[in-house]
Image (cartoon, grey):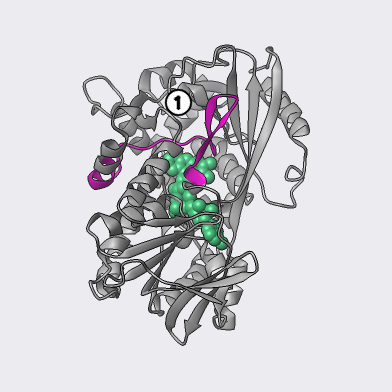
Amino acid sequence: MTQQTSPQSTLPSVRILGAGPAGIAAALALRKHNQATVEVLERASGPGGNSTSFQIDGIWCDYGSHRFHPVADPAVLGDVKALLGDDLLLQPRHGRIRLGGAWVHFPLKPLDALLRLPKSFAISLLGDSLTKKFRKKSTGPQTFSTVLYDGLGKTIAENFYFPYVSKLWGLPPEKLAVTLAERRVSGSSVGKILLKMARMLPGLRAPTTGRFFYPRKGFGQISTAVAAAAEAKGAVFNYGTNITRIEREGTSVKAVWTREGDQDLRHASDQIYSTIPLTTLVKLMDPPPPPEVIAAANAIKFRGMILLYLILETDQFTEFDAHYFPELSIPISRMSETKNYYSATGPKGLTILCAELPCDAGEKWWDMSDAELGAHFCTWLAGVGLPVTVPVRRCETRRIAHAYPVYDLEYEANFDKIDNWLLSLDGLLSFGRQGLFAHDNTHHAFAMAYAAAEVLTPDGRIDKTRWAEHREEFRSHRVED
Ligand SMILES: Cc1cc2nc3c(=O)[nH]c(=O)nc-3n(C[C@H](O)[C@H](O)[C@H](O)COP(=O)(O)OP(=O)(O)OC[C@H]3O[C@@H](n4cnc5c(N)ncnc54)[C@H](O)[C@@H]3O)c2cc1C
């Protein structure tokens, strides 16, 4: 056994588990004001987690469509802008969604929706809006389904949200919790959706309405820049680590253990900041937590995803950044053309389409070869009027196990059990999208990390009252698509 010590021992020491946006932003925030010595332990070979980018044949690709949303907290946005400088582009959103069999601009624009939505769909939507007051409200336990029927009515619920969420989470809307509607549905009534659309009108829109930030070298350039800044300020990053256990004495968390070759290393610290999935965190605890906490961790589920990258020998497939597919006839939820996100002019004669296929290990798609999945991808596109008529170089795939937290009807009780137990421990703080089972964006993960740095006291403890206040703030996070 070897003891890993911190380089600057007069400061509190913090070990951060995971170098996704939450982990690296915490490292930067802690080092910015020399608050603590920081060592980041990450399983992957680089920073970024689900917000990483990589190149395929000279084109930057992400793990599905990623945009940095201008609604980010000003402190977060300010740091990202300062770090990326001219490499951070402000791009117009230019997507399409299939509604009632027609392509409509997404985000919705009033005139476009008026012209393109099938008349029957539009009339039915209007009817839902006008009859809302007189509609009989659902009685009994509330679910995603009842909230959507009551708020938005049948047309948008059945033609958009229900098939879309069934695909994303692999569960019907009546088996999904109300929280999902709170976190994900941006307009809780047709009136609110119309108001949101009205804000897209010239004269009424803010400079960033209908726009998003995106770096020249893929979304992951944000993570690379933040990790580099943290490293420059003294944070130590250990990639490719194998965390074997987390040592605990009663309610006190003492150290993280890793295995390197045939050596077990003990990383003792004042605080462990964990941004890895809370289910993994529970399983690493030594001694294990009470049986009910283990049972809750076994019951809580993350949705996986296969990313399909179809490499086409043409400059551009369409002018759109993303296509959204709510309907069940096509198993992918979204397709993005990555070059369009950063207005790439090269490489010439080549483009890549990235499809998001929600899927868990064990489902039929999970073990299919890249070539088979590529062939299906082409068939699905032909089915929605987007036939691939140019040469396909090949299809590559990536698989992620923790794409989305699944908010089923039991999740809240299970999450609370785990969360309350973790909160009862000293020397440990769990946060980030995976650490709090939160359906959050990257800018939210950054905001959580900044809050986590703020609550570290000079003597290496956590200001628990302040953390509870931050946790309340996190409840207001709303997912931007
Ligand atoms: C398809 C898709 C599209 C998205 N689109 C957007 C978007 O447009 N805009 C946006 O803002 N956000 C988007 N997001 C969300 C964004 O990806 C996340 O909010 C962000 O990556 C969360 O950061 P995190 O650090 O909390 O978690 P993660 O990014 O998941 O990072 C967790 C890290 O922990 C590491 N880890 C896990 N287990 C271990 C272990 N045992 N030991 C060591 N390390 C471990 C992982 O390797 C990873 O690096 C999208 C997500 C998905 C899935």
Is residue 105 in sight in this rendering? no
Residue at image coords 45%, 25%: 341
Above or below 204: residue 409: below
Identify the residue position indicated by label 1 in the image: 341
How packed mark 1 is, by other alpha carbons closer than 10 Å (few <14, some 14-19, many 20 or more), is many
Task: Identify the residue at image location x=37%, y=69%.
Answer: 6
**Whole-percent x and y of residue 317?**
58, 16
Q: Is residue 307 visible?
A: yes
From the image, which quarter does the N terminus lie in? bottom right
211 on left or right of 156: left
The secondary element bearing badge 1 is classed as: helix
Magenta region = 50-77
Of all residues, the one furthest to the bottom in this rendering is 250
**Of 463 and 38, the residue lying toward us:** 38
- Identify the residue shown where x is 46% and y is 32%: 218
The stretch drawn in magenta includes residue 352: no
Is residue 69 in the magenta section? Answer: yes
Residue 288 in the figure: left or right of residue 253: right
Residue 466 sits in which quadrant? bottom left
What is the x, y in percent for residue 343? 43, 19
The residue at label 1 has a CB less than 8 Å from ligand 1: no
